[in-house]
Image: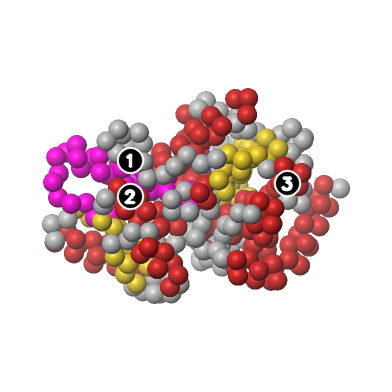
Amino acid sequence: MGSLGDANNKKPWVETPLHESPTLSRAAGCRIFLKLENLQPSGSFKSRGIGNLVLTEAAYHKAIGSTRPLHFFASSAGNAGLAAVSATSALGYTSTVVVPTTTEESIVEKLKVNGASEVIAHGPTLLEADLYLKEVAMPRAEARGEIPIYVSPFDNEAIWDGAATMVEEIHRQMPDGEAPDAIVCSVGGGGLLAGLANGMERVGWGSEVQLLAVETKGADSLYQSWQAGQLVTISGITSIATSLGVVRVCQRAFDLLARKNVTSLVLEDAEAAMGCWRLADDERIIVEPACGVSVALAYDDRLRQVLRPFDKNKKVVIVVCGGSKISVDALVQYKAQYAERARELAAQWAGMSG
């Protein structure tokens, strides 16, 4: 169990609103609630899990009487890195992020603005950046007398415990104290899915609430593992939803597929992209495709097909997980590139309803 409510620590995440959306409810044919994790300090849900990891490590080293300074290390070209530097900056710790050399300058600048002590560009891939972090950057910190701490983006119990706080908030925020019928979340490495499952157990929902775990085709390591009946490593990432770009999900996420209330779903890039566009148009909220793929379930009869039995009184929470790799220009490009394909897919979903 992580630190979470340690009185000596400031939590580097915030309670976010649960907004019932009339517009998306009308589109979906049932009640849609948006959990606005895009409002976290780092711009994504990762503030919870990675923030709790930082708190947990700090509490542990304080408990054992360590006096050496802590230095947190993350390899990330996006949301995990932003969450790490946001949390460490808020709590007064040093952080280093190693990014691939292909990382956009805008992301590097965001990491610096959000409080990174150091941003290092190394290697063409995240794997090479991560190896450099572990084999070079962290040993250097050790040699300086610091305690280097590796920040996993998703595979850590403290991260799952942090993400679980989202469900505790939803439990308090749902109208009339009712449980939702389903929670929709995006899946990259599976940390959010694992945290939501933990949170559901904490509040006593158990198998009562459906968990719809959504990926994009080309970043669907969970779905392919489900298809294979074992945890697999996919050959690479071809989706535009690069924040879902994990070739192998954590074991905990895969194990959850054995539960009857957990469903793995895959949509196309076009659906994720237009999910972003339609959310911006309907709710004035800008998110990246890794989030848009979950939002897309609210449109074009998709929920009617995946949530059985279905009726207008069903209550569905969509985790608006946020993300930093998005801009107004990108939304315009998405519409130009993907609108036609999205219409074709929407017609297919509508045909299934007929």
Please tell me whether the stretch drawn in magenta is mainly helix, strand or loop: helix
Q: Secondary structure at mark 1?
A: loop
The residue shown at (18%, 64%) is 140
| Residue at 39% from the left image edge and 74% from the top image edge | 101
Residue 90 numbered tag: 2
Asked which secondary structure carries label 3, the reply is helix
Q: Are marks 1 and 2 in contact (CB under 8 Å)?
A: yes
80 or 217: nearer the viewer: 80
Residue 47 included in the magenta stretch of the image? yes
Q: Tally the numbered discs.
A: 3
**What's the amino acid at mark 3?**
Thr
Q: Is residue 19 magenta?
A: no
Residue on which disc 3 sits: 23
Which is more N-terminal, label 2 or label 1? 1
Q: Name the residue type under label 1.
A: Lys
Residue occupying the point 44% across, 53% down: 42
Looking at the image, tell me whether mark 2 or mark 3 is earlier in sequence order. 3
Residue marked by disc 1: 10
Residue range (magenta): 44-72
Residues marked 2 and 3 touching at CB (< 8 Å): no
Mark 1 vs mark 2, CA separation in Å:
8 Å
Percent x, y of residue 202: 47, 29
Q: Position of residue 260 (x, y in %)?
A: 60, 35
User: How far from the left and from the top, in percent, is residue 112?
Assistant: 35, 64
How far apart, in angstroms, are the residues tagged by discs 1 and 3? 36 Å
Q: Amino acid at mark 2?
A: Ala
Question: What label sits on residue 63 in the rendered view?
Answer: none
Choose the circle earlier in sequence order: 1 or 3. 1
